Image (spheres, grey):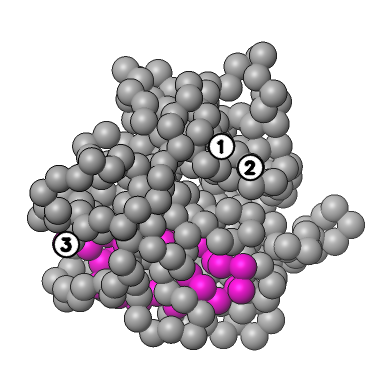
Amino acid sequence: MTVERPRAFADLWEARGTPRPPTTMANPLGGARADDRPLTPDEVAATTGVDRGGGIHLSPDGSEVAFAWDRDGAREIYSAPIMGDRIIQLTDLDGRSAAPRWSPDGRWIAFARDVAGVRSLWVVDRDGEHAREVTADDPPHGSVSLSAQGIPLWSADTASPALAAAKIDHVPGSASWSPDGSTIAFTTRARGTTKIALAHVRDGRVAGVEVIDATPFEDSEPIWRPDGRGVVYRRREHGKVTAHRVFTVSHADDAVLDVPGWVFAPQVGADSETIIAVLVDRHGADVVVRPKGAVAVARITRTASATGQ
């Protein structure tokens, strides 16, 4: 399928009408609005906006984030610079698109598409010019596939989870290798609640496991900092879910994204300090960013504005 390449323009969502195509939107970054009332799990589940189940994904160079968003009622794939002023709609398909994953070379985004309960694997190029289903005759075939959870996996990503599963007792889908390949970070339930653990690998064997267990809270879904010094993970406490980081040597732990609401799918920028995630609060589910050295959290998407709330 061929999709017309979006043209950049600056246009307020609140404007009554415009002849310009709606595939590229103005994206004035602004702070996440505070609301101290805790969300219940049912309220989180009912919140519309950016898909948090399939997660978001940073491009290999760390400059763009890909995500699925039901901005106009149909869930499509979008991308946006993590520090910029526009959002690009990459797909315009029937059904529901989810779980975008960048290819290792940054040229393609793989995603899952669901039509009438049937899930298939698709790819779209970085500019949104070409989207097609992956079949046996397509060039990307063999380099990308769907995992058991329906999440696209590029060939460069498949070895680590498989090896980790054979070595450690982890929550499925939670294991990831450190950049230097020496340590696996994963979520474990070995002590009755979810905790972050680190498995140190030597000569193909697990030489030891450390469980990060300094608090009574539920910690899960670790993702490595690019510098390999530590991991960022989700913590559930007191009616909210925040993003924390812990360093592998000192075990020093602190919050990196602590705002009212529930944080999903945290990602770490190329500088190892910028944090990107999906924030679900009373204004919707949006992609947010906390730049390196910043205190304020900015919204990349604005579901409430997009839907006229």
Q: Label 2 is placed on what type of residue?
A: Arg
Give me the disc on residue 282. Answer: 3
User: Does residue 266 belong to the magenta stretch?
Assistant: yes
Task: Tell me, yes or no, whether the two marked residues, 3 and 2, touch with CB atoms within 8 Å.
Answer: no
Q: Which residue is mark 2?
A: 107
Q: Label 3 is placed on what type of residue?
A: Arg
Q: Residue at x 60, y 17 (%)?
A: 135
Q: Is residue 90 visible?
A: yes
Give me the disc on residue 125. Answer: 1
- Whole-angstrom CA distance, mark 3 to mark 1, is 33 Å
Callout 3: SS:
loop
Name the side, left or right, on which 12 lies relative to 145: left
User: In front: 41, or 191?
Assistant: 41
Name the side, left or right, on which 155 lies relative to 244: right
Q: Position of residue 29 (x, y in %)?
A: 33, 69
The segment highlighted magenta reads: 256-282
